Each structure stands twice: as C-alpha cells, then as structure tokens.
Image: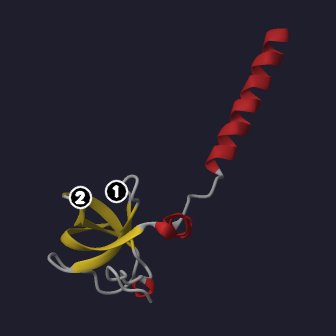
Amino acid sequence: MWTIAVLTSVGLVVGAGLLALISQPDPGLDDLELESANWRQVDAEVLSVLRAGDRTFLLVRFPVGTSLIRNDVRYPLPGQVPYAGQRVPVKYDPVAPARVVFDLHPETRRTPNPAGQSQ
C-alpha cells in the first residue's frame, strides 16, 4: 500500500512539472528584440530564401572582422520577401556572431563617427 502511495505521489509531481513546462509561453520576437538591442548592426547579403509553413527564413552572409558568417535568420515582416543577392539589415551578437536577428528598426542605426571629428 505504501508503494502505491509513493508511486502516485511521484506521478503527480512529474505530471505537474511536465504541465508547467508545456504551458510556458514560447519566447517571441519581442524578447529577442529586447535582448538584441545592443547588438552590432550590419547589412547582410541574402543567399537564399526558405519558406516553412507560415514562416520565412533567409540564409544570409555578413562580415565580422576578417570572417564571413553564414546563418539563417527568420524574416518577420509580411509582404514581399527579399530576393537572393539583396542586402537586408541584421543585428548580430558581438560575443557570438552566429546569433543573428533581422533588424526590425534599421532607421535607428547610429552612423559611425569619422576619426578625429567630434559631433
């Protein structure tokens, strides 16, 4: 009898934990956009376009230092999708450049300060 009570309790605890994990909301683009607020901005070249259901992914290539990084980035905007060869604004994590997101607000880009000039 004691064994049945312990197994039932363990089953309930595992079930509650599983239910809590399943009910967690999927982190959306808003969370990633907040995280990527201080990432570096660059124009990436679109190599190819992949449509998967209702989502679109772009295979992009962009320079980081002396390296060229190739990675997939989710294209979140409705309407016309960029074509291969077109340049699109992306942001990447300077610590891990393979982490890249589409730059939803490219108009907020900071222009680099020319050497020796103050603003």
Is 61 on the left or on the right of 18, as rendered?
A: left
Q: Is residue 44 above or below residue 19?
A: below
Q: Is residue 49 above or below residue 14?
A: below
Badge 2 vs badge 1, beta-carbon distance below 8 Å: yes
Is 112 on the left or on the right of 8, as rendered?
A: left
- Mark closer to the chain start, 2 or 1: 2
Please name the residue shown 76% across and 31% down the image. Answer: 12
Label 1 crowd (10 A; few <14 / some 14-19 / many >=20): some
Q: Colour scheme used in the picture?
A: secondary structure
Residue 111: mark in rendering: none
Assign the N terminus to one quadrant of the image: top right
Q: Which amino acid does label 1 sit on?
A: Pro
Q: Quadrant of residue 114?
A: bottom left
Q: In the image, residue 38 lies at what x, y percent?
A: 49, 68
**Which type of secondary structure does the marked residue at label 2 adopt?**
strand
- Of 102 and 3, which appears nearest the observer? 102
Q: Is residue 13 above or below residue 97?
A: above
Is 108 on the left or on the right of 45, as rendered?
A: right
In three-dimensional space, the C-alpha distance between marks 2 and 1, rounded to whole angstroms, equals: 7 Å
Q: In which quarter of the image is residue 94?
A: bottom left
Q: In the image, residue 11 lies at what x, y percent?
A: 72, 27
Q: What residue type is labelled 2?
A: Ile
Q: Mark 2 points at which residue?
A: 69
Please name the residue shown 31% across and 73% down the image. Answer: 42
Residue 13, can we see it? yes
Q: Name the residue under label 1.
A: 97
Residue 53, can we see it? no
